[in-house]
Amino acid sequence: GAGVSQSPSNKVTEKGKDVELRCDPISGHTALYWYRQSLGQGLEFLIYFQGNSAPDKSGLPSDRFSAERTGGSVSTLTIQRTQQEDSAVYLCASSDSASGIIGELFFGEGSRLTVL
Amino acid sequence: AQSVTQLGSHVSVSEGALVLLRCNYSSSVPPYLFWYVQYPNQGLQLLLKYTSAATLVKGINGFEAEFKKSETSFHLTKPSAHMSDAAEYFCAVNTGRRALTFGSGTRLQVQP
């Protein structure tokens, strides 16, 4: 597709359930990022993938959060045993190598997660 | 360490008035600085960026920002607000780390 695609766009789940959020980056983009946007907050960095390098997981808030990127393309963010404080919009972004270094990211529309 | 502070979570201006959204950064090395805009129910898109070339940067939709090292600022301005400018604006910094650090955002309202 032409842009970054995220699914689902909305997810409502019960506390304690696991959820998976998917991101399909722009074709050819080697870098992929996950951010979390909570109500009234800025964007919180979660994890960054660049090519075949080990991902930068320094932003993951707890071990309930994990992400993988298969084949250097699609990425899945998994949240286990969801808590109410996990409710947020999860944004995925991608970039090519050069643009990513200087911060020109292309964002998807986000996946809104609501934990009841 | 790198960080940005956006002063004012909400700014309201009249249509046709000057828009000024404030951003101050903290960085131990020369930064790259960015403004992103998020329209309702959409992802973020790049408005403009400073990458150590000209200190006055022009972006899309008539916005511009000036890098002032002495003030550690990168404020966003537009001479005349339009109703379509209503959105949330995020300042961001990158100092060579592998991910942008974003500010908390400023929601711009434009009154008719």
Image (tube, helix red, strand yellow):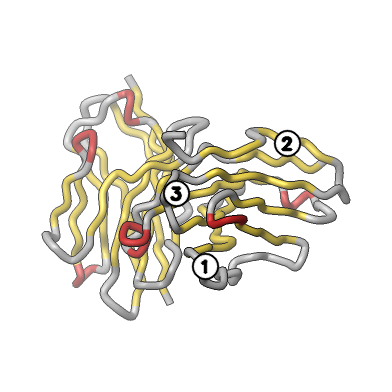
Asked if the residue at tag 3 contacts the one at tag 2, i.e. Cβ–Cβ closer than 8 Å, the answer is no
Quadrant location of the C terminus of chain B in the rendered image = top left
> What is the secondary structure assignment of the residue under circle 1?
loop
Location of residue A79 by image quarter:
bottom right
The label shown at residue A52 is 1
State how far apart marks 2 and 1 are (Cα). 30 Å
Neighbours of disc 3 within 10 Å: few (<14), some (14-19), many (20+): many
Which residue is painted at 52% across and 37% down in the image? Answer: A109
Neighbours of disc 2 within 10 Å: few (<14), some (14-19), many (20+): some
User: What is the chain letter for disc 2?
Assistant: A
Q: Who is closer to the viewer here, B25 or A27?
A: A27
Neighbours of disc 1 within 10 Å: few (<14), some (14-19), many (20+): few
Marks 2 and 1 belong to one chain: yes
User: What is the chain letter for disc 1?
Assistant: A
Q: Which residue is mark 3?
A: B105
B51 left or right, relative to B99 = left
Q: Nearer the viewer, mark 2 or mark 3?
A: 2
Asked if the residue at tag 1 contacts the one at tag 2, i.e. Cβ–Cβ closer than 8 Å, the answer is no
Q: Is residue B57 above or below residue A7?
A: below
Q: Position of residue B78 (x, y in %)?
A: 21, 39
Which residue is painted at 45% across and 47% down in the image? Answer: B9
Q: Is residue A94 above or below residue B54?
A: above
Q: Which residue is mark 2?
A: A11
Q: Position of residue A83 (x, y in %)?
A: 81, 52
> What is the secondary structure assignment of the residue under circle 2?
strand
Q: Nearer the viewer, mark 2 or mark 1?
A: 1
